[in-house]
Amino acid sequence: MNRTCVGCRQRSQRADLLRIVSNSEVLAFDHQKNMPGRGAWIHPSSDCLNLAIQRNAFGRALKLNKQLDSSGLVITKEQAETMLAKNE
Ligand SMILES: [Zn+2]
């Protein structure tokens, strides 16, 4: 199943993307990819994250018209690799 990255807008396999959800307007990674509600999908790269934050793409993807707190969405390369490794 392919999903569109909210950062670069490229389509990728679910397994290559991270899921992001909002919890009371605070954005967070859905590490297990099974939290209820809408999710936004993104590549595990700071480039894609920054693009999405700049364009407020999370708000659109999650159908929220509010300013969302993306301060929790800082990702390190190690974290990204760990998250992707769990996708198997
Ligand atoms: Zn991307």
Image (cartoon, rainbow, N blue to C red):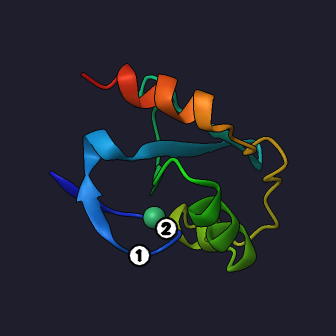
Q: Residue furthest left?
A: 1
Label 2: which secondary element: loop
Q: Amino acid at mark 1?
A: Arg
Quarter occupied by the C terminus:
top left
* Left or right placement of residue 14 versus residue 62 in this view: left
Q: Residues within 10 Å of mark 2 (few under 14, many from 20)?
A: many
- Asked if the residues shown at circle 2 and circle 1 are in contact, with their CB atoms under 8 angstroms apart, the answer is yes
Question: Badge 1 local density, few (<14 within 10 Å), some, or many (20+)?
Answer: some
Would residue 16 appear left or right of 32 to someone viewing this image? left
| Left or right for 59, reference 9 | right
Comparing 2 with 79, the one in front is: 79
Above or below for 27 versus 33: below
**Separation of disc 2 and disc 1 at Cα?**
5 Å
Residue 14 percent across, percent down from the top left: 27, 46
Residue 60 position within the rendered picture, expressed as x and y whole percent measured from the top left? 57, 73
**In the displayed structure image, the side of residue 5 where residue 88 appears, left or right:** left
Residue 43: x percent and y percent?
Answer: 46, 54
Q: In which quadrant of this rendering is ligand 1 seen? A: bottom left
Residue 19 drawn at (x, y percent): 47, 43
**In the depicted view, which residue is nearer to us: 75 or 61?**
75
Residue located beneath label 2 in the image: 6
Instruction: Tell me what residue is drawn at x 62 percent, y 69 percent.
Output: 52
Residue at (60, 28) in percent of width and height? 78
Name the residue type under label 2.
Answer: Val
Specify whether tag 1 is near ligand 1 (CB below 8 Å): yes
Q: Is residue 8 above or below residue 48?
A: below
What residue appears at the point 56 percent right and 53 percent down from the top-left corner?
Answer: 45
Q: Which residue is mark 1?
A: 9
Q: Residue at x 57, y 44 (%)?
A: 21
For label 1, the SS is loop
